[in-house]
Image (cartoon, rainbow, N blue to C red):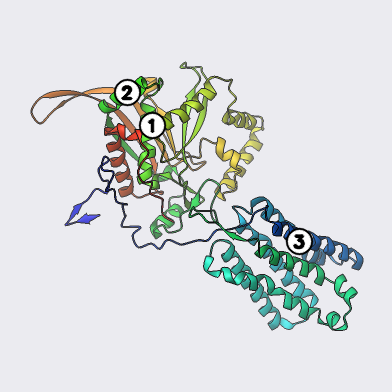
Amino acid sequence: MRSGGRVIDPSPGLLRKSNIAKPRFLCYNDLVMEKRVHIYVSRKNVLTWLMTLCMICSAVTRIAFSGLKGSGDSLYVWSQIVLPTAAVLLYVFIVLVEGKELFYKTAIPVWMAAVYFAFAIANNYRLGPINNSLYFIALAFLAVLYTQISSGQGQLLWLLPLLTLSPIPFIAYFHRDELLRRDWAAFACSDALPNILMMLGFTVQLFALRIHPSDEYHPTWGDRTDGRRLRTLPPMAQVSPYIMVTRNTSTNYFTEAFEISNIDRYIRMKRREGLTNFGITHVFLAAYCRAIAKYPGLNRFLSGQKVYSRGNDIQFCMTVKKEMSADSPDTVIKVHLTPCDTAKDVYEKMNAEVEKVKNTPLNSSFDHTAHALTLIPGVFLKFVVWLLRTLDYFGLLPKFLLEVSPFHGTVFFTSMGSLGIPPIYHHLYDFGNLPVFGAFGCKRRSLEVQEDGSVVQKKYVDFKFTMDERIADGYYYAAFFKHLKRILQHPEVLDQAPDEVIPDID
């Protein structure tokens, strides 16, 4: 931000706790945050099970009556029997298994049902091309409307009853002859009964819908299991991933030297408090988490040419040797942290993961997964890696693979200091979504001349970062690292949780 031609640092003092204002950034100021309403259903609701009964009866009667009438040609079987049966069963599966968090996925079977009704109208009733087109448009409109409502458009909730009941008059119209003759047997043996049971199931489910009371974000279309998509990014930030496609061709490099006199005193104090293995890695990591509390853009990642946020889940990855020897095997740990974690929290979580791999044989989840891949012949392994990359691009990679993968996370730290060498610029991985890689070296001493002419010896640690520039602009990165440096100058602030955690944009 500028004031009178001067650039103002957006980072307020670390020790001023009572007057910390939420920072605003020029590129995000005028963006409208979209308010979503999270709809969910519970398996504990008896109406959910009544809906399940209606849907299963719809599938059973459809299959039974088709057997009595004859299956017909292959197009009829697939469009009038298989498709609606799969739609109702998939709807039941989504509601019972994922209805608490992912109810919006019920739009998939609703679209399947719309396609089924479109085929039914086109094949069974001679309405003419104009009327057929109008029905197809109406079905598509209803499906789009349901998709919008189920994905969080709360202002349209009142339309849901009309939406689910609207096909029933059409079903009655198309079977008006049987109804007027009161030929209930013919009516029951037609597709009317399965369709009415299907619509009845949708209607019953309406009364089981609830709105989630919390203000927390809940996933919707376009989100991934490991992050939510950012939809209000500036246009340039949305276009640049399609221009700068790979992660290694989109990297910036940054080096910084951190003065560690206060950090050394802080480490000695924490060790006297009982944190015997407390070291500089814990301080750096705790400070990084604390900086993300104010600048959440560093907890973003890019996948499938879209930018996502991990929210409060900071995933830290690090390579660990079982023993400090050249032939000791490596393994990778992944630690889940939050912006609210103190230095002690970081120490306990990280040490728990380190001890887990050091005190056992080489059998971490990462090692098991890597070993399983080595059993695949080379030609097929190349295909498997391509398949995993494709699934990851579309956000379909299983959650257990995301958990063990060192290529998916917030930041990867490597300590060159433990090896006695300076830091390196480590490349980012084109597989996965890791946006930041940091390496720090061993401690060094430097003689510096002060303003009064005296010479003072100071201790530094050099840090080198490799960063994906597509997750945030240069100004944001600069503000983040200046804030990180101030935290490291006052590491005692890491003993308390932050007063405020700023959420990322919508």
Q: Which mark is residue 343?
A: 1
Q: Nearer the viewer, residue 44 or 377?
A: 44
Kindly identify the residue that appears in the image at 30 percent across and 27 percent down.
263
Name the front one of labels 3 and 2.
2
Q: Amino acid at mark 1?
A: Ala
**Residue drawn at point x = 79 percent, y = 63 percent:** 58
Q: Which mark is residue 269?
A: 2
Query: In front here: 466 or 145?
Result: 145
Q: Residue at x 29, y 24 (%)?
A: 264
CA gap, disc 3 to disc 2?
Answer: 65 Å
Q: Is residue 271 above or below residue 234?
A: above
Question: Is residue 173 something one can see in this rendering?
Answer: yes
Q: Which mark is residue 147?
A: none
Q: Residues within 10 Å of mark 1 (few under 14, many from 20)?
A: many
- Whether residue 252 is visible to the viewer of this picture, yes or no, is no
To which quarter of the image does residue 287 belong?
top left
Q: Residue 428 appears at what percent x and percent y?
A: 44, 38
Q: Residues within 10 Å of mark 3 (few under 14, many from 20)?
A: many
Residue at the extreme left of the image, as rendered: 452
Picture layout, residue 146 above or below residue 229: below
Q: Position of residue 36 (x, y in %)?
A: 50, 61
Alpha carbons under labels 1 and 3: distance apart? 53 Å
The amino acid sitting under disc 2 is: Met
Q: Quadrant of residue 360?
A: top right
Q: Which residue lies under the disc numbered 3? A: 55
Q: Amino acid at mark 3?
A: Met
- Mark 2 or mark 1, which is nearer the start of the sequence? 2
